[in-house]
Amino acid sequence: MPALAADLLKRFAAIVGDAHAITEPADLEPFLIEHRDLYRGSTPLVLRPGSVAEVAQIMALASETGTPIVPQGGNTGLVGGQIPHNGEVVLSLSRLNRIRSVDPGNDTMTVDSGVVLEQIQKAADEADRLFPLSLGAEGSCQIGGNISTNAGGTAVLAYGNTRDLVLGLEVVLADGRIWNGLRSLRKDNTGYHLKDLFIGAEGTLGIVTGAVLKMFPKPREVATAFVAVDDPAAALKLFTVARGKAGAQLTGCEILPRIGIEMVLKHAAGTRDPLAEAHPWYVLVELSSPLEGADVDGLMQAILEQAFETGTVRDAAIAGSIAQARDFWQIRLMMSEVQRSEGGSIKSDISVPVGKVAEMLERGIGIVEKMIPGVRPVPFGHLGDGNIHFNFSQPVGSDRAAFMAHWDEVTRVLDDLVMELGGSISAEHGIGFMKRDLMELIKQPVELDMMRAIKQAFDPKGILNPGKVV
Amino acid sequence: MPALAADLLKRFAAIVGDAHAITEPADLEPFLIEHRDLYRGSTPLVLRPGSVAEVAQIMALASETGTPIVPQGGNTGLVGGQIPHNGEVVLSLSRLNRIRSVDPGNDTMTVDSGVVLEQIQKAADEADRLFPLSLGAEGSCQIGGNISTNAGGTAVLAYGNTRDLVLGLEVVLADGRIWNGLRSLRKDNTGYHLKDLFIGAEGTLGIVTGAVLKMFPKPREVATAFVAVDDPAAALKLFTVARGKAGAQLTGCEILPRIGIEMVLKHAAGTRDPLAEAHPWYVLVELSSPLEGADVDGLMQAILEQAFETGTVRDAAIAGSIAQARDFWQIRLMMSEVQRSEGGSIKSDISVPVGKVAEMLERGIGIVEKMIPGVRPVPFGHLGDGNIHFNFSQPVGSDRAAFMAHWDEVTRVLDDLVMELGGSISAEHGIGFMKRDLMELIKQPVELDMMRAIKQAFDPKGILNPGKVV
């Protein structure tokens, strides 16, 4: 157990009360393990404050004593940002779990940062509104973590990243002062936009304790199509047609390779091929409208007709029921999961300008196929955002460990390609601990200098999530 | 003329060449006068660099010598932010006026910061796309100024503020270093989002020299309705119905008072009342769709029917032609202008949470009517953004000067009300020079401290637009 003087530990514990100051090894465990078992941290103390005032007191004491703090939400982060890698004290936000108010008249909701994303979705739904942020971990991730990592998910195309869903923030600073920036305004040009600095800062500039979130009208009509195309270039053309005709009503546009479909059909019970014949690539297109009776099926027909006419599309199925639409999405949602049953897979989280997705896919596949003969590329994801989960499964019958030993090499060539195309090596997940060493490679010195200057200004003692991001 | 040592002036001039270093009083004039004649600055030198490298050299020299610099775009700012109030050197971006590239495949455009907004709208149009930022000064304002003030305008409801339209920035820092942040990605979570710090910073943190802008599908079908309601509360209800049914297809929602209509009918040639009878308040509703043949008229009908059923709406006219839609908008667009013909008017630029617009209007009108008997309130504007131009015309037959003497008093009570309702005293225009003294009143000390810490980190010598914002 890392060192923390007994009297200091007691002072921290006294702030939250002994019942909420965890020190028993067995009880600490869930806060230390990254859920894919990539990282295991260590800590003498997990603090579970029950109020913003307690968070402020913890930071004031941490600042006074130079004690490093790792803030933690639902512990679902994918880059190790929430883990105490060097024995830091963990500050868990889980007890700040109140939805403070819901205001349908302003289409906003004010929440504690420890509220689980699914609870927020439900609260919006009960107010006959949509909170569009949606991702795999939504049953356990917390909105404070979503905000601190600027989470993406499946609804970015129409509604934006988490950044675009936040109107205001409440933040406890490194020195324990509380900033009440809980504004719920659509327009406010009074000075620097501090909220955008904390969003995506991964807990290195302050601790988010509350937020004002935007809500949207609920979709009443949805059309979902499973569309076959020859290659990623055709998929891009289809996206351009769909976006041009549907605008903001295009709420999903995901690209899927044939091999991914086959893996799903083989390993996921109850799935079936939406189309009669096999095609090399597919696009899952979703349109939606808040207007009851809106003709989104007609809109889908118009999009597909234009795409057929130009030879962009080979075949297509429009879901005839909600159940069928769910089946289409199920294929997409299972695509990461089923790769486990096919042996080792090397994964990444990258983005490029939307118009360069086809080039990135074609060149990236070519490079890795040359590097590892027999490798099975399974790239899929958010075509409309330029964000692809560029995954590779091991060659059939090959040795798993030997394949996985290529991880760094594959990641490096893909990252190089992504940078050449003006892309990002971390589209959704952030930098955290995992990618911090890459920052020197991907950022200009002047940009790193600006980030360090901000970090220095906001956290001069370096106690907020040290060793992460910058 | 303020002092600037002759040899230093020569060094600055040498960077841009004598032809672009203005020192003659007559030639300096256009850079010194605020167009409403609220402010008049002074300067020994206006520099008109022709490249980003020259901007960088200017700032390097300014930093070396501690010379304050005021960046200026189209000189259309409304809070005096672009004026050299204390004899600073003016850095005009006007010669950086190239559209660097247009990429319809990625729905983006990369531009110099000195390009006039209207040119950008046209370039998008030529690529069969929409650049939605639109405001009164669009024929002369420059995109760099729009970015530095996070300009609003008439399309915020559907497309957001300027901030939401910018994917990447190129910025020359106070010390002359160039940050190339010209990314064109929809998703990028690699460190602090520096671009959002420069947007809306009014040239106090760096000089924007280039930007990557988002483009959108062009609207193909538009429906426009002029709707009569009893009061602002009914207007809000109508907005809620329209937003709930049309979602992102609701592209305009403006509130107008009867007296404003009457002023327009009286003073603006060729205008006529869209409805047969007079009503106390009106809402101008616009729907649009990028899909040719989309039934936006049917959508408008559905919205109005539901609003009629609940007694929210008294009467409505749907434009039967593009010309009629233009006539409806003309009434809205003339509303500020015609107030000139009715004597003095006291104006403001405020916002509140959308759900509080009715309360703000009712209380604000009540307070000022009590303060100035006979005053004529003419509040109108962006209902859907919570941003109202809360204007007051002088009582009929009263003394103009006596009325205008109430400016500060009226502004103060409105600002107090706005702050009480969680609003903003500068929704669109920024802080600049005009509202800097108010920052102490409207911001928490901790927020001002953060802003000052950022200013100190980015501009330690205080040479970037000194005396503005913070």
Image (cartoon, coloured by chain):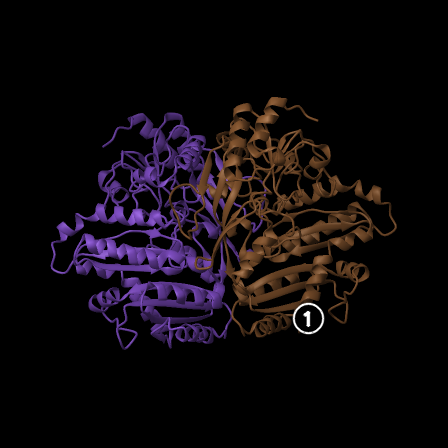
Chain colours: A purple, B brown
Q: Is residue B340 above or below residue A23?
A: below
Q: Is residue A266 above or below residue B6?
A: below
- Tell me if B106 is positioned left or right of B422 in this view: left
- Tell me if A162 is positioned left or right of B27 in this view: left
- Tell me if A409 is positioned left or right of B217 in this view: left
Residue A33 seen: yes
Of A99 and B152, nearer the camera is B152
Of A84 and B260, nearer the camera is B260
Of A116 and A185, nearer the camera is A185
Q: Where the C terminus of chain B falls, by quadrant?
A: top right
Pointer 1 residue: B316
Q: Where the N terminus of chain B falls, by quadrant?
A: top right
| CA neighbours of label 1 inside 10 A, class few (<14), some (14 to 19), many (20+) | some
Query: Pointer 1 indicates a residue of which chain?
Result: B
Q: Position of residue B71 (x, y in %)?
A: 59, 37
Question: Of the residues shown, which amino acid type is indicated by label 1?
Answer: Ala
Residue A426 seen: no
